[in-house]
Amino acid sequence: MKRVRVKHEGEPKRPLSAYQLHNEKYFPIMKKKAEKATDIFRLLAQRWKNEASEEEKAKFVKKAAKAKKKYDAEIAEFRKEHPVEYKYVEKRKVKVKRDPNKPKRAPTSYNLYMKERRVKIAEKHPDMKSTEVIAQIGKEWREMSDEKKAPYVVLFSNSLTRITYLTHNSHPCHFLVSLTRNSITRMLRKT
């Protein structure tokens, strides 16, 4: 659990720092010189570090200090009515990296059919968009009889059995074994 401060409605916003005030002023100028945000902020940082004079920086520092003083007064007044409160939230779960030795999931019977048909359609109609090709293949698959789908279902079950064997023997994902057996059984019952 992570401790986070609760923000109240109407809470004064923190003031900008001297550097942020500088960036706010020169952002439109730098935007004309560069397109990407990273390039714009790189130019702003270079300007602050190399080109801005000490007098110019002092103006921004003075302005930031004045804003900070005003903020401190406002937040002190605000805290009288709304004391600081904290809540606990769960930390984000870290995404687990995929094991490179784990076998990939078996392609479905439709995927196997699509892989075969896509090449043939692309040769016949090279000007056809990929979305149109996929739509046509999907339409063909829906209209196809179970007898014509059978070879692809058998290929699917064979590849699923191979992946189940690999998973069961070389990787600790044993839950996949029961899932794939059920999937194979269901697919074979349909044919």
Image: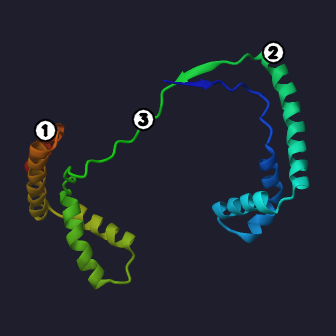
Q: Which residue is mark 1?
A: 178
* 160 vs 114, nearest the viewer: 160
Q: Which residue is mark 3?
A: 93
Q: Is residue 86 visible?
A: yes
Q: Are marks 1 and 2 in contact (CB under 8 Å)?
A: no
| Mark 2 nearby-residue class (10 Å; few <14, some 14–19, many ≥20) | few
Q: What secondary structure is found at the residue carrying circle 2? A: helix
* Lower position in the chain sequence, tag 1 or tag 2: 2
Q: Residue at x 87, y 31 (%)?
A: 69
Give me the C-alpha separation between circle 2 and circle 3.
Answer: 37 Å
* Lower position in the chain sequence, tag 2 or tag 3: 2
Give me the C-alpha separation between circle 1 and circle 2.
Answer: 61 Å
Q: Which residue is mark 2?
A: 80
Q: Amino acid at mark 2?
A: Lys
Compared with 41, 7 (above or below) is above
* Lower position in the chain sequence, tag 1 or tag 3: 3
Give me the C-alpha separation between circle 1 and circle 3.
Answer: 27 Å
Task: Locate residue 104 relative to residue 130 in the image: left or right.
Answer: left
Q: Position of residue 129 (x, y in %)?
A: 39, 76
Q: Residue at x 54, y 21 (%)?
A: 88
| Mark 3 nearby-residue class (10 Å; few <14, some 14–19, many ≥20) | few
Q: Amino acid at mark 3?
A: Lys
